[in-house]
Amino acid sequence: MAGKLIVFEGVEGSGKTTQLEKSYLWLQANGSDRKIVKTREPGDTELGLGLRQLLLQVKNTQPIYPTAELLLYAADRAQHVQEVLLPSLATDTIILCDRYTDSTIAYQGYGRGLPRSMIDGLNFFATNGLESHLTIWLDVAVEVSLIRTRLRGKCDRIEQADLGFHQRVQEGYNQLAQAFPHRIKRVDASLDEQAVQEQIRAILQQHLSQ
């Protein structure tokens, strides 16, 4: 497998989607002879798009229970790995992915309180053991991230969760970064967009030159 799976992670409003797009354009403009694709979880397959709508739309009816939520994300990931990630990696492609397995640990594990052993087992099953080669964690205070999210307008189901949930998610990312420093690289996402992008470019240059 010759390609690279580079994942962008962070709490809501951390800027990961914006920075992924900036990184994609920068890599394309700087003469890489490798194909570069951008993708996301959930929702970058036909099946995943339907699951994304189920997971993120706001309803006033019966809530989605944590275990059901976990399984829906796993179903999206299993389809995504087989349909998008593995074929791209087999062709020496650089993949920039908006969320992957660390999101599940942070949100459903730390945020929802589901057992880590169950999440790890399900992640492994859904991915066939495929891990990111590099994860860029955009670290920003939850209070700042939620202000950014609300300024964007209408919030989805996850964004509408209470402050305690988002604080637990942030702590999850912090713990993951400490546990896997070789794979997860922290970026100070409290700075302006260009300063954040410069940090990311330095990380990408170092990683892709190895």
Image (spheres, grey):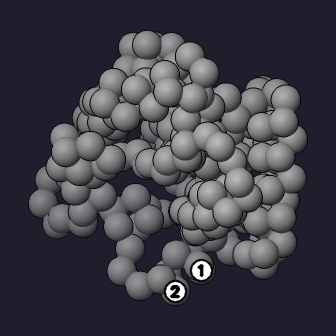
Estimate the x, y position of residue 94 in percent, counting from the top left: 59, 39
Query: Could you tell me if residue 116 is visible in this image?
Result: no
**Vertical placement of 41 versus 190: above or below?**
above
Residue 129, label in figure: none
Identify which residue, 41 or 161, lies in the foreground. Answer: 41
Residue of label 1: 147
Estimate the x, y position of residue 81 in percent, counting from the top left: 39, 28
On-image quarter of the C terminus: top right
Total labels drawn = 2
Residue of label 2: 151
The extreme left residue here reads 61
Alpha carbon distance from label 2 to label 1: 6 Å
Estimate the x, y position of residue 105 in percent, counting from the top left: 54, 33
Tags 2 and 1 touching, CB below 8 Å: yes
Q: Identity of the amino acid at label 1? A: Ile
Residue at horizontal 41 percent and vertical 85 percent from the top: 153
Left or right relative to 22: residue 84? left
Residue at horizontal 33 percent and vertical 62 percent from the top: 157
Q: Kindly state the secondary structure of the residue where label 2 is placed.
A: helix
